[in-house]
């Protein structure tokens, strides 16, 4: 198993060095870059106020966090979920910076930045000069954004997991075994503007005949429709 963890945070602001704190952290376990279904999610009391401009982004108020744990209370569970594999995030230095500031307050060592995988860097290499926010990438890859009315760490992780699959080429959508003699295989190609277009692969009559002839040479082929 090639295990990694994709994660996201929500915060009270943009700079942990001026007192901004983490108020939500979510993470998904990936195996060979695909989600396993295991996740981690905590709301966290920041021990300070949450400015209105931050609440407009993520929808979280201090009242919602009244009974939430402090960060030091969730550290052990978070580190256990993170384990020691790669840590994937969009604009990862931002999230690493906030988590490391929280770890420092609790007297814990920083996350190793050698574990960092930044999907924003991957996207900029793939689509140079184009918008590469999470929203922009979801639209480019035709990923449903209808539930994303505000930033939400767990939902953002689920969306980013789909984006990450597309960026790394870890899965070809639409790949399946045909049962009606026709090919259901599709591959993704991209227009000059970066829009993803699905292109079906259809075998010619000559190719189908050659394939059938080849199967006759094999004893009990599992690919035979007979």
Image (cartoon, grey):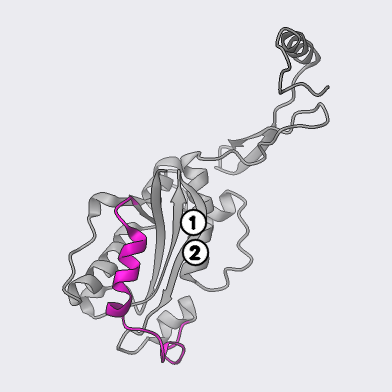
Q: Residue at x 48, y 58 (%)?
A: 134
Report the front residue among 196 and 72.
72
Few, some or many residues within 10 Å of mark 2 (<14, 14–19, 20+): many
- The residues colored magenta run 60-86
Q: Is residue 145 above or below residue 186?
A: below
User: Which residue is at the front of the view, 182 or 72?
Assistant: 72
Quick one: SS at disc 1?
helix
> What is the distance, in whole Å, between disc 1 and disc 2 at their CAs?
6 Å
Few, some or many residues within 10 Å of mark 1 (<14, 14–19, 20+)? many
The reply, left or right, for residue 112 in relation to residue 53 is: left
Per the image, the residue denoted by label 2 is 156
Towards the viewer: 18 or 81? 81
Give the number of marks.
2
Circles 1 and 2, Cβ within 8 Å, touching? The answer is yes
Q: Secondary structure at mark 2?
A: helix
**Residue for badge 1:** 160
Q: Which image quarter: residue 54? A: bottom left
Q: Is residue 171 left or right of residue 178?
A: left
Q: Which residue: 54% across, 52% down?
A: 162
């Amino acid at each position: 198993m090639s295990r990694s963890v994709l994660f996201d945070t929500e915060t009270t602001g943009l700079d942990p060095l001026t007192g901004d704190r983490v108020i939500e952290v979510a993470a998904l376990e990936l195996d060979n870059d695909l989600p396993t279904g295991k996740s981690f999610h905590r709301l966290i009391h920041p021990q300070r106020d949450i400015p209105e401009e931050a609440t407009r982004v993520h929808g979280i108020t201090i009242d919602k966090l009244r009974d939430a744990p402090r960060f030091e209370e969730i550290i052990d569970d978070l580190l256990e979920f993170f384990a020691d594999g790669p840590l994937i995030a969009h604009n990862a230095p931002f999230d690493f910076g906030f988590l490391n500031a929280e770890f420092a307050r609790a007297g814990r060592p920083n996350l190793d930045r050698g574990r960092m995988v930044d999907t924003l860097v991957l996207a900029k290499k793939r689509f140079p000069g184009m918008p590469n926010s999470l929203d922009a990438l979801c639209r480019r890859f035709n990923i449903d954004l209808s539930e994303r009315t505000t930033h939400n760490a767990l939902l953002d992780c689920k969306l980013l997991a789909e984006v990450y699959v597309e960026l790394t080429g870890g899965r070809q959508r639409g790949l399946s075994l045909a049962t009606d003699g026709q090919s259901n295989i599709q591959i993704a190609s991209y227009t000059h503007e970066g829009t993803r277009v699905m292109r079906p692969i259809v075998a010619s009559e000559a190719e189908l005949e050659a394939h059938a002839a080849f199967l006759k040479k094999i004893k009990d082929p599992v690919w035979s429709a007979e």
